[in-house]
Structures are given as C-alpha cells and as structure tokens.
Image (spheres, rainbow, N blue to C red):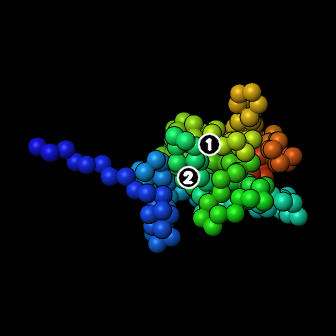
Amino acid sequence: MALAERLKISVSDYLDGELLSNLKHEYINGDVFAMVGVKRAHDIVTTNLIAALHAYLRGSSCRVYSGEMKVRVQTAETDCFFYPDLHVSCSATDTAEQFNCQPKLIIEVLSESSERYDRAEKFHHYRKLPSLEEYILIAQDVERVECYRRNELWDLQIYRQGEIAVFQALGMELALADIYEGANLAD
C-alpha cells in the first residue's frame, strides 16, 4: 500500500490562487488551509474596531486593514501568510499589492474554532515580525480584551467590561463598550 504524497504549493501559486478563489486560505510553509466563516458578534466587533481605528488614524502615516488583507511572516525558516481580523501598518515601505509584512498591531477576534490556533501557532509566527509591537485577542462572547505588548518578552494586559483598552502601539484608548457596541452579548 503506497502512502499519499504530501504536495507543497509555492508562494507564487498561492498568491495567484487567492486572487481567483471564493474562499480565503492561510499559507504555512507550503501548506494551505481554508478559512472558516464568522458569527454575527465577531463581525460586529471587527467592524467596530475598524471604524474606530480608521477614524483615529486618519491623517497619520498608519493605515488599518481588514481581514481581507494578508500579513506575511517571512524568515530564513518560515514563509507564512495569515488573514488577521485586522491589522495596522505604519510603514511607508509596506506596499505589496496582496499583503503587508510590517504590521505594528495585529488584532484577532476569537472564535471557538480559531481560539487555540490564534493563541498558539499564529502568535508563534507573528512574534517573528520585528515591526509588531502589540498582538490583541478579543473575545466575541464576553467583554474581554487581551493585549500582548512586546517588551523584553511579551507582557499581557487584560481589559474587562467597563474598562478602557489601551492600544499602546498607536497611543489610542478605546472603551470596551465601544468595541462591543451592538454585539448583543449574553449577560
């Protein structure tokens, strides 16, 4: 009995395929993984964040990107493309058509299907980005924001209902009530 051969896809083929596909896929060292859909609360939280960040960054050199723009993590050992829920790049040289490589801030809105992946494998890769100053994980079912900040290590600050989250990389504060506005969370 022969074993199935595991085929790797090139970066070029991956990027070309993403332009034609109806589904989004993440790419990890030649392996491609389809992305799943999101629930209403996830989309509302993401939209609230994009609106707040866009308004706050207007007129600056920084730009907020939605989950439609990929982030590339490339090192000597790794070449990956991810679709974070949103990210901010402030680099004038981050100009590739299909992805950014120098995000300053990355935000993932957690879901049951992606939480473990966002906390472990994605964060493992994102930490390799020299430009990344903050990685923020946001629950979609309860008001909770976890902000990992790059210092000597990655320090964690947790914000809960009624508090104001500080996005230190941008010098921005945002009330959790504004992040979760309209999400109709169960009490």
Q: In the picture, which quadrant includes the N terminus?
A: top left
Look at the picture and state if 2 lies above or below 158.
below
Task: List x then y, in percent, for residue 112.
Answer: 51, 44
The disc labelled 2 sits on which kind of residue?
Phe
Name the amino acid, label 1.
Answer: Tyr
What residue sits 62% from the left and 60% below the top?
99
What's the mark number on residue 166?
Answer: none
Mark 2 crowdedness (10 Å alpha carbons): few <14, some 14-19, many ≥20: many
Label 2 sits on a secondary structure element that is strand
Question: What x and y, as percent, mark residue 146?
Answer: 69, 37
Q: How many marks?
A: 2
Residue 149 vertical placement versus 55 (above, below)? above
* Horizontal and vertical percent position of residue 59: 88, 64
Q: Is residue 22 left or right of residue 165?
A: left
Name the residue nearer the viewer: 102 or 155: 102
Query: Disc 1 or 2, which lies upstream in sequence?
Result: 2
Q: Which mark is residue 82?
A: 2
Residue 173: percent from left, percent from top: 85, 46
Residue located 71% across and 36% down the image = 148
Residue furthest bottom as drawn: 20
On screen, 56 above or below 168? below
User: Badge 1: few (under 14), some or many (20 or more) residues near its Cα, within 10 Å?
Assistant: many
- The residue tagged with tag 1: helix, strand or loop? helix
Residue at x 53%, y 49% (from the top left corner): 80
Please state which of residues 119 and 98 is positioned toward the viewer in this rendering: 98
Q: Which residue is mark 1?
A: 126
Please indicate whether residue 145 sits to the left or right of residue 8 in the image: right
Do labels 1 and 2 touch, CB within 8 Å? yes
Q: Say whether residue 76 is visible.
A: yes
